[in-house]
Amino acid sequence: MIVLCGFGVSNYYNKLKLLLLEKGVPFKEKLVYPWQREGFQNASPLGRIPFIETAQGGLSETQAILEYLEDEFREKPLYPASPFARAKCRELLQHLELNVEWVVRRLYREAFFGGVVSDETKSEVRAKLAAGLQALSRLARFSPFICGADFTAADCAAFFHLDFVRQASLKIYGEDFLAAHLPGAAAHLTLLAERPHVRATMADRAAALTAFLALKSGYAG
Ligand SMILES: N[C@@H](CCC(=O)N[C@@H](CS)C(=O)NCC(=O)O)C(=O)O
């Protein structure tokens, strides 16, 4: 049985959880916070969450985990079948992480966790985030899913990463960067939000956030 380790506030954790639910893979959840890293660095060497425990050992990095789950549990594929379409899906996932998530996360301290981010960082992020989203808009199909007609692993990732982009940009700049730079994203998020597994993951996220804030104010991811 797969054990998903981490905490339900993390968008990385939630994209894996959604993928597991959508694929119908049986799994358990284990609550692990990053500051407990000494106990789990054998599974996640940098002490990051999420990671999974399997009968063969631990595995970190969500992109690697998504692909492992796809290879191991083939009954309901969540990557396209043809090599090129699969690669396009991975390309999109990579852009989403490197050029969107890793940029916008510099705002999270202030946007979500009660800290402060400098004006310099805010202005740097503003330009890079716009560029990252515009790049994504050249790849995203939104017809109706992000890679085309079928729901894929990239939708699992996009839902949680893009939701944080929207929230953080509204909070920090008073502007919805999705509306400005990624046409089609709002309708995509609305479409995905209707999925029962998305709804369940979001409900768990709300509960996890309450527990997390009570435990650790000032954490900045
Ligand atoms: N590239 C990693 C990123 C995971 C990540 O950044 N996790 C955050 C929580 S959302 C974390 O563990 N932060 C604590 C730290 O970096 O020490 C992945 O895809 O799994």
Image: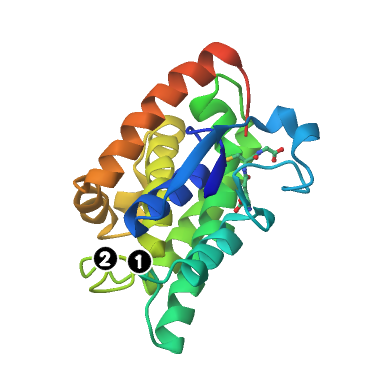
Image quadrant in which you'd find residue 119: top right
Mark 1 or 2, closer to the camera: 1
Q: Is residue 107 visible?
A: yes
At label 2, the amino acid type is Phe
Q: Position of residue 44 (x, y in %)?
A: 72, 47
Image quadrant in which you'd find residue 32: top right
Q: Secondary structure at mark 1?
A: loop
Which residue, given by chain and number where applicable, does mark 2 sit on? 145
For disc 2, does the CB lie below 8 Å from ligand 1?
no
Front residue of 100/201: it is: 201
Q: Report how many numbered discs are placed on residues in the image.
A: 2
Residue, x 55% and y 44% (percent of image)?
3
Residue, x 44% and y 88% (percent of image)?
84
Q: Position of residue 90 (x, y in %)?
A: 50, 72
Q: Residues within 10 Å of mark 2 (few under 14, many from 20)?
A: many
Q: Position of residue 114 (x, y in %)?
A: 55, 19
Q: Which quarter of the rendering shows the C terminus?
A: top right
Residue, x 78% and y 43% (percent of image)?
41
Which color scheme did the rendering employ for the protein? Answer: rainbow
Which residue, given by chain and number where applicable, does mark 1 sit on? 152
Q: Position of residue 21 (x, y in %)?
A: 36, 50
Q: Secondary structure at mark 2?
A: loop
Check the image and report above or below for 200 versus 133.
above
Front residue of 42/14: it is: 42
Cβ atoms at labels 1 and 2 below 8 Å apart: yes
At label 1, the amino acid type is Thr
Q: CA distance from mark 1 to mark 2?
A: 8 Å
